[in-house]
Amino acid sequence: MKLASRIERLRIESAFDVLVRARALEAQGRNIVHLEIGEPDFPTPPHIVEAAKKALDDGYTHYGPTQGLPELREAIAAHVSESRGIEAKASQVCVVPGGKPIIFFPMMALLEPGDEVVFPDPGFPIYESMIRFLECVPVPLDPKDPRITDRAKMVILNSPENPTGEVLGRAALERIAEQVRGRDCMVLSDEIYSRIYYGEAPGSIASLPGMQEKTIILDGFSKTYAMTGWRIGFGVMPEWLVDAVNKLMVNSNSCTATFTQRAAIAALTGPQDCVVEMVAEFRKRRDAFCAALDTVPGWKCPMPGGAFYAWPDVTGTGKSSKELADLLLNEAGVACLNGASFGARGEGRIRFSYANSLGNLMEAVERIRGFMEGWG
Ligand code: PLP
């Protein structure tokens, strides 16, 4: 039996692919420094884990409301209202298993084949995968000169950004908002890294005048509270879109696990020093790792403003980013991602996640330097 043609239009995330290859090398006795996967290396804070255990003891082991527990939706609405300076209501919040469904569901609900979708290139590979899956037309966004085409039905933004670590400035957000207002076009604003930044705080396009009703905010718990394995995230969107997202949820998942939702309430309403400490640690690693990479011959590494990724320019090595990423894994024992796997405009770059110990990060730089010297 042949697979449906739509499956061919789906892409994968190369991080999971490289992880498998790195593990295979480890199984042969090789030592690998893992800088490929985009997840905090810290444990989930203990008060969140305790809240989940208590929820299990209290019987949160059954189905819950498709849209999410009302008490969690209230906590999310309060948090998003305060952090974005908007008025978000619990009725506008959809709780889903991870941030990814807020890419999938609103796109499924809003787009028809042939619609143009403006998306970040380089960017999180799932955006382009979903655009192609839905038979839409991908239009790359230039963050320095953001132009929204007349036929665009959706603009996807991601700030701070994976893989570049860039934070979209207010001027860029305003230019995009100007072009979207009054048009039949929605913004999907992926703000999953909104609390991980080192300089200018990332703004949300939803807080610009008239933009809340044109924006779907995607956020979640995976990155902020080191909860990638819990599978919990949320969207905040105009009320008219909520029913469609609920329909897609009930058809695919029924609901998000209720004990993880109780843990998410503890995450949002409990002490926030865990987030502050994690970001401070990421900052130390960013400073040391990017500065060290910048001294490797042929490499240039800018300081990213947010998330936990380094995105060095490796055009000076004369190798394609795929060739170089493969060599670094196989010869130097450093697992990383080739920039072109984030879109055509990512060629000439490598993505490293610095969610690893400072010791391992410095070891990676020394391996890369040694490899470049030996090879050059
Ligand atoms: N959006 C971006 C930009 C990401 O980098 C990721 C995860 O890597 C996600 C969304 C998905 O997050 P989650 O693991 O909560 O589904």
Image (cartoon, helix red, strand yellow):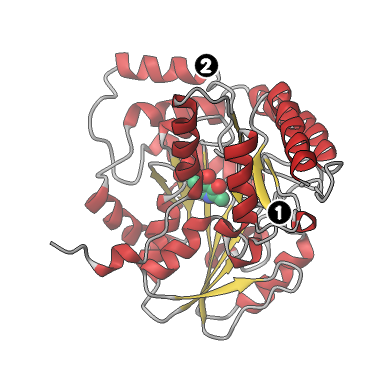
- Dot 2: within a 10 Å radius of its alpha carbon, few (fewer than 14), some, or many (20 or more) residues? some
The kind of secondary structure element at disc 1 is loop
Tell me if 47 is positioned left or right of 251 in this view: right
Residue identified by numbered label 2 = 47
Where disc 2 sits, the SS reads helix
Please say if 117 is above or below 324.
Answer: below
- The amino acid type, in three-letter code, at marker 2 is His
Q: Which mark is residue 349?
A: none
In this picture, residue 65 sits left or right of residue 220: left
Task: Locate residue 58, reporting x and y percent.
Answer: 30, 16
Residue 259: image quadrant is top left
Q: Position of residue 108 (x, y in %)?
A: 36, 65
Q: Residue furthest bottom?
A: 150
Q: Residue at x 78, y 47 (%)?
A: 376
Q: Residue shown at 39%/63% (left/top)?
A: 241
Residue 190 pos. (x, y %): 56, 54
| Residue at image point 42% right, 31% down | 230
Amino acid carrying mark 1 in the image:
Gly
Residue that label 1 marks = 203
Q: Quadrant of the N terminus?
A: bottom left
Q: Nearer the viewer, residue 291 or 195?
A: 291
Describe residue 317's horizontal placement relative to residue 147 as left or right: right
Q: How many residues crowd mark 1 within 10 Å: few (<14), some (14–19), many (20+)?
A: many
Q: Quadrant of residue 197?
A: top right
Count of number-bearing discs: 2
Report whether residue 237 is seen.
no
